[in-house]
Amino acid sequence: MFEKLENADFKKFRDLIYDSSGIHFTEVNRPILESRLKDRLKKSNLNTLGEYYNILISQPQELKVLLDAVTTNLTSFFRNAVQFHALENEVINQLMASKDEKVIKVWSAGCSTGEEPYSIAMSLKEKLDRSWRIEIIASDISFNVLMKAKEGFYPDNKIAGIPPAYLNKYFVKTGGGYHIIDDIRKIVTFDYHNLKYDSGLRNFDVVFCRNVIIYFDSKAQMEVINRIYESMNPNSYLFIGHSESLFGMNTKFSFVKLGEACLYMKK
Ligand SMILES: C[S@@+](CC[C@H](N)C(=O)[O-])C[C@H]1O[C@@H](n2cnc3c(N)ncnc32)[C@H](O)[C@@H]1O
């Protein structure tokens, strides 16, 4: 097993990860990459980084496992409450007024363990009557988080942020946690997707891509944002993380402020 990730190896693995996902490792987070590589070598019974690199470039499945291992999956229900306030009180009303068909399509890109798409689903369910069809696609590059998301089970320590009325209405209490009810689960479709590539999905009215591009460099950020733009309908809304910004980026999105929430529109 290697002791320390030398410069040449750091660059090799950093570039491979960047080229295949947009995730950008800097000097600051080099120790994270080192520890994930050690873990993968141990689990694959390998001694050298050279052997592991050769496996990565010849076996797409192992590359997926490594990408999964280097992602940060922190999330929570109704994360950044002002954005959900804007969704429930402004965005949905504006969509209801502007849509020809009674269908609202949402994409949660980089959905992690499901808290974000399920929060969106609950907000939409609250506001739209049964004559509306709600479709939510939730995607991620990590198979581990997608598996947990599909299960829809959240331990007691993960439910902070859910308004009590929603918890009563949309969850069933089981030993040690809560299960999301089928009525909500069935409007969310989880799928593997790497934002490095075009998903081929189109006609979204709302896209959440929050706390994902923060791990990319500016070139990869712009490519992802422009691809997302192509997937959206006219008069649609993009939510990004509150510490992220499209400022200075060459995109066609218009900045809008709805209440306290900052978001973007494809006009
Ligand atoms: C910090 S979590 C954010 C989850 C949620 N959007 C939120 O704001 O709470 C970032 C997620 O983006 C995913 N991710 C990172 N790079 C990705 C890529 N290239 N394609 C798709 N998902 C990616 C990670 O696996 C992770 O689950």
Image (spheres, rainbow, N blue to C red):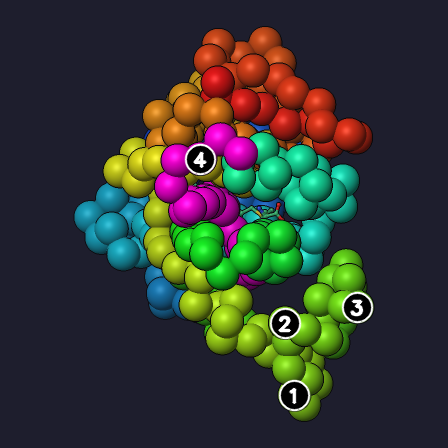
Find disc 3 in the rendering and name its residue: 164
Q: 10 Å neighbourhood of mark 3: few (<14), some, or many (≥20)?
A: few
| Residue at 55% in and 76% down | 181
How far is mark 4 from mark 1, CA to CA?
39 Å
The label shown at residue 99 is 4
Nearer the observer: mark 2 or 1; the answer is 2
Compare marks 3 and 1 and give the one earlier in the sequence.
3
Is there a contact, CB below 8 Å, between mark 4 and mark 1? Answer: no
Where is 267 relative to 155, above or below?
Answer: above
Q: Secondary structure at mark 3?
A: helix
Q: Rate crowding at label 2 as few (under 14), some (14 to 19) or many (20 or more) other CA atoms within 10 Å.
A: some
In magenta segment, residue 115: yes
Q: Which residue is mark 2?
A: 170
Q: CA–CA distance between discs 3 and 4? A: 31 Å
Instruction: Tell me which amino acid carries mark 2.
Output: Tyr
Disc 1 is placed on an element classified as strand
User: How many residues crowd mark 4 within 10 Å: few (<14), some (14–19), many (20+)?
Assistant: few
Residue tagged 1: 174
Residues 195 and 184: in front is 184
* Upstream in sequence: badge 3 or badge 4: 4
Q: Is residue 196 magenta?
A: no
Image marks 2 and 4: residues in contact by CB distance under 8 Å = no
The residue under label 3 is which amino acid type? Pro
On the question of residue 89 being in view, the answer is yes
The label nearer to you, 3 versus 1, is 3
C-alpha separation, residue under disc 3 versus residue under disc 2: 10 Å
- Residue drawn at (72%, 75%) of the image: 168
For the residues labelled 2 and 1, the Cα–Cα distance comes to 13 Å
Q: Earlier in the sequence, mark 2 or mark 4?
A: 4
